[in-house]
Amino acid sequence: MKAFVENLKKETLADPKPKVTGGANPKAVFNIAYSETEPLQRAHMSLMRKQGQDYGIWSARLEFSVSKATPSGLLQLTSAFENALPLLFEKMLPDFRVSRIDPAIDLIGIRPIDVIARIEKPGKRLVYVGDNGEPESLYLYQKKQPLKKPPASMAKRTTGPLRLKLYERRDYFRQLMLDPPYGDCPVTRVEAELVWDSKRPMLSSLPELSNPFAGKHVAYAAKLAASHTKPRDWLSFCLAAFGSGARTAQEKWPKGIGISFRNTYSSCPGDLVHPDCWHRWQDGLAHTGLGDWIMLAGPKG
């Protein structure tokens, strides 16, 4: 394997041409385009020997967007994998583990400012505001437990784990000089990032993955305005709470109104994103074509 990677440095006909690092821990990284119409949509594929291993233990890694690839793109990736590496893709599938997925739901016709997003045990939040003065992205972090003693390093993060992310896809594409996915219509993507540093699930077990939207709700703020005698004040409260949270926003209204607004904001059910939406997860796997890979991977053992 080491000789194979070293030879890639000399290979002039390799397609795609990899970036090769030699030495004690050789590595080859391929940048593969899997869409003929969207050349910016690429997968990163790497073959490497793990650092610190005396016995030459190798690993292959594949990073890409399943939803962008679609079934035809997965076929191209399968072919590119076998053309680039001296490995049979189908034989490796049963050993594939997943280190990260980003399950997402697109809210078509909705801007981030139009919604109430809440998680269990909320902590810090991060808001990015665009040039137009409207929020473009919202990151919701779970409350971090207080430290029992000072950290050994000042690099210690003060945010808890990221539980939910919302961002406006139309503006994102426009800033990249690309055509938005749904034309001029605003689209808010709600994403629940899952990352495994250890105990990574097998590819074949993805259909039974635990619901990442459990405890997370996204509601349309204007729909709840009818429950209040002052709907304009309610929408103003939602605007304030979007950036600073419901507790801080409550202080800007008389006590009774502020408490009522905060209770509605903090307990509203999600009519746009709700934990029950996860029952469509296997439909999503089938739609993207990843279900075929999972079937080939089969149950381990």
Image: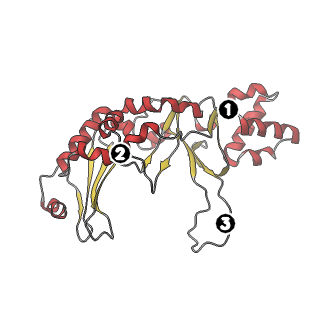
Q: Secondary structure at mark 1?
A: loop
Q: On screen, 56 above or below 86?
A: below
Residue 51 place in picture, x, y as percent: 33, 68
Circle 1 sits on which residue?
269
Circle 3 sits on which residue?
147
Q: Residues within 10 Å of mark 2 (few under 14, many from 20)?
A: some
Residue 139 place in picture, x, y as percent: 58, 48
Q: Which mark is residue 300?
A: none
In contact (CB < 8 Å): disc 2 and disc 1 = no
Q: At 20% across and 53% down in the image, what residue appears?
A: 17
Q: CA distance from mark 1 to mark 3?
A: 33 Å
Callout 2, which amino acid? Phe
Q: CA distance from mark 2 to mark 1?
A: 33 Å
Q: At 19% across and 64% down in the image, what residue appears?
A: 2
Q: Secondary structure at mark 2?
A: loop
**Residue 135 placement: quadrant:** top right
- Image coloring type: secondary structure
Circle 2 sits on which residue?
64
Mark positioned earlier in the residue sequence (2 or 1): 2
Mark positioned earlier in the residue sequence (1 or 3): 3
Q: CA distance from mark 2 to mark 3?
A: 36 Å
